[in-house]
Image: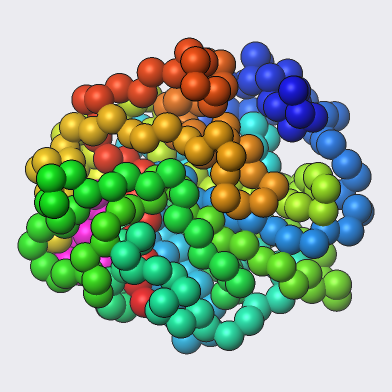
C-alpha cells in the first residue's frame, strides 16, 4: 500500500458521508508534507459538469447552478464549499501561451467554438492561467457509433470519447507568488513535488438520468445553446472504471472517482475490489470546452 492510499483509507472512514463540505478541518493534521515544500507541478482536476472557456489571456470555468449539487474545491478529501457568486483565482503557477487546438485534443474532449457565456447563470467563476497540458481522464467511448451530442451547435470535431474528469497540469511554478486559490480556504498539500487541486460541481448521490439531462440543459442554456442536447443513447450509462494507473503524474486512481462513488464506500480500484458503478445513472460528469 502506498503512502497516498494509506492516507486515503484513514480519511475516508470519517469524511465520506458529509455534505456539502464533505470534509472538516480535522484533516489539516494529516497533511503529508509542509506546504513550504517546493513543488514541481500542479494538477487541477475538474469533476462533474463545467464549461471551460479558453479566452484570449486566461481560462474561465463556469458551473451550472442547481439544487442538490455540491460545489467544492481543495485537496482530495479536504475540499471546502465554494460560495455562490464568487470569483476564485489560481496563483503560484506561470501561464504559458494559449494552447493550440490540437493540444486540447478535440477527438477526446467536447470542444466547441467560443461563444458568449451567461455568467449570471453560473454558480461561481473560476480563473486559471493557461495550463501546460490538458488531459482527459476516465474516458467514456462512443457507443454503436452514436455521437454524444444532438442539436446545435456541433463540436469542432465529433469526439470519439469524452472524459469524466478533465485535468490541467502546470509545470512552471511562479516563485514570486504563493500557490493559492483565493478566496477559497485551501492549504496546498505537496507530495513528491506535486500538488493536486480538485474542483467539483457534482451530485453526492448517483444522479438520475432525468436530473442529469436537466443539469446539462442548464449548462447548454448558460452558453446560449438551448438546442444542444445529449444523445438519448447516453441517458443511462455505466461509467468506465478509473484507470488503476492514471496517466497524470501524482494522481491516484481513487482521485478519478465521482462524488457519488466516493461517498459509496468503495474499497479501491483493483480488479476484484468492491466497486459496482450503476448502469442506470445519468451523465453528470462532463466538461464542455469553449475554444
From which residue to which does the magenta span run?
Answer: 216-226
- Residue 222 on the magenta segment: yes
Residue 83 x %, y %: 53, 48
Residue at point 23% right, 33% down? 237
Residue closer to the observer: 20 or 173: 173
Give the quarter of the image for residue 32. top right
- Residue 122 on the magenta segment: no
Q: Report if residue 86 is visible in the image.
A: no
Residue at point 56% right, 16% down? 267
Residue 80 x %, y %: 62, 39
Quadrant of image for the C terminus: bottom left
Vertical placement of 11 versus 171: above or below?
above
Coloring scheme used:
rainbow
Quadrant of image for the N terminus: top right
Residue at point 49% right, 15% down? 272
Give the quarter of the image for residue 22. top right
Amino acid at each position: 500500500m502506498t503512502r497516498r492510499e494509506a492516507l486515503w483509507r484513514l480519511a475516508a472512514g470519517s469524511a465520506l458521508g458529509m455534505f456539502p463540505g464533505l470534509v472538516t478541518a480535522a484533516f489539516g493534521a494529516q497533511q503529508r508534507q509542509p506546504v513550504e515544500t517546493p513543488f514541481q507541478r500542479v494538477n487541477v482536476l475538474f469533476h462533474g459538469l463545467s464549461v471551460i472557456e479558453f479566452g484570449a489571456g486566461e481560462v474561465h470555468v463556469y458551473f451550472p447552478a442547481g439544487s442538490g449539487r455540491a460545489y467544492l474545491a481543495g485537496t482530495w478529501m479536504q475540499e471546502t464549499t465554494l460560495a455562490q457568486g464568487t470569483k476564485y483565482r489560481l496563483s503560484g503557477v506561470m501561464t504559458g501561451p494559449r494552447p493550440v487546438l490540437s493540444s486540447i485534443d478535440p477527438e477526446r474532449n467536447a470542444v466547441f467554438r467560443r461563444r458568449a457565456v451567461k455568467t449570471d447563470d453560473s454558480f461561481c467563476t473560476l480563473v486559471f492561467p493557461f495550463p501546460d497540458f490538458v488531459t482527459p481522464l476516465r474516458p467514456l467511448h462512443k457507443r454503436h457509433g452514436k455521437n454524444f451530442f444532438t442539436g446545435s451547435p456541433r463540436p469542432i470535431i465529433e469526439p470519439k470519447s469524452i472524459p469524466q474528469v478533465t485535468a490541467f497540469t502546470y509545470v512552471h511554478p511562479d516563485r514570486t507568488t504563493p500557490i493559492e486559490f483565493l478566496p477559497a480556504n485551501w492549504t496546498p498539500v505537496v507530495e513528491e513535488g506535486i500538488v493536486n487541486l480538485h474542483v467539483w460541481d457534482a451530485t453526492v448521490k448517483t444522479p438520475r438520468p432525468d436530473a442529469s439531462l436537466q443539469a446539462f440543459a442548464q449548462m447548454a442554456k448558460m452558453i446560449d445553446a438551448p438546442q444542444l442536447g445529449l444523445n438519448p443513447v447516453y441517458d443511462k450509462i455505466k461509467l468506465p472504471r478509473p484507470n488503476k494507473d492514471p496517466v497524470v503524474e501524482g494522481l491516484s486512481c481513487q482521485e478519478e472517482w465521482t462524488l457519488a462513488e466516493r461517498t459509496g464506500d468503495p474499497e479501491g480500484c483493483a480488479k476484484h475490489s468492491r466497486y459496482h458503478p450503476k448502469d442506470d445513472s445519468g451523465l453528470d460528469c462532463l466538461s464542455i470546452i469553449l475554444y
